[in-house]
Image (tube, rainbow, N blue to C red):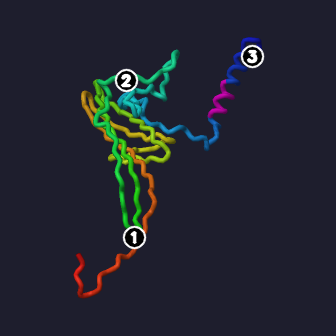
Amino acid sequence: MDGTKAISALCLAGVLASVQAMAQQAPDTARPAYDGSDSPNAPRRIYIDQDCRIEPDPAHPLPGKKARPFSDSAICHLESVSQSNHIEEKIAGDELYRNRVHIAEQEFVLQNITEGQVLFIVQVAVSADWTVDSDPQPVSTEGDIAVFPVYADAGQIVRLHVGLRHTQPLKTKFIGAKSQAPQGTAGN
């Protein structure tokens, strides 16, 4: 065997070894789940934060400068931003339970300005002692972020109402039995 044939045989042996190693990959190694986002027919994803800013796609970061969120009122703007407080009361047995409730709500107005379907992924931060009080409920909660997916066809405008609720318990009151007037007397 001359030098050229020996090198060719070594290269072939190396290729066969690497193919064999890939074929013997551990069967319990799970492949990552495919969500269809790289499919040519999949809707484009646009990430929106609670301030209606467009976030960079976390799955496809742009090389170079750090991508920052930006605002575009043609794509997303907020309407009906409101806050309210009220007291809720509930009687159970001879006790009056009271809660001070704070509600913060806003409506996202999302417009698809592309020629194809878009999936808006609205991500709203929820503080530790607050709950999401809206319809629809988020599809998932990742840490302290509630995630609402919203589909929009080309040129379509869609609205998403998001409400957050904070309940603060107040001191429970005892409700005693009221004294009744003796029979035969009329009470005023």
Give the residues drawn in magenta, as a range: 15-22
Q: Position of residue 108 (x, y in %)?
A: 32, 35
Q: Quadrant of residue 2?
A: top right
What main secondary structure does the magenta stretch of the protein show?
helix
Please state the total of marks drawn on the protein image: 3
Up/down of 117 relative to 133, above or below: above
Q: Residues within 10 Å of mark 3 (few under 14, many from 20)?
A: few
Q: In this rendering, which labeled residue sits more in front, label 3 or label 1?
A: 1
Q: Is residue 143 left or right of residue 158?
A: right
Say if mark 3 contacts mark 1, CB within 8 Å: no
Up/down of 167 relative to 62, above or below: below
Q: Is residue 15 visible?
A: yes
Q: Position of residue 64 (x, y in %)?
A: 52, 15
Query: Disc 2 marks which amino acid?
Result: Ser
Q: Which residue in the structure is indicated by mark 2? A: 71
Mark before the other along the chain sequence, 3 or 2: 3
Query: Disc 3 marks which amino acid?
Result: Ala
Q: Which residue in the structure is indicated by mark 1? A: 175
Residues at marks 2 and 1, CA–CA distance in whole angstroms: 53 Å
- 20 part of magenta stretch: yes
Helix, strand or loop at disc 1?
A: loop
Say if mark 3 contacts mark 2, CB within 8 Å: no
Q: Which residue in the structure is indicated by mark 3? A: 6
Query: Disc 1 marks which amino acid?
Result: Ile
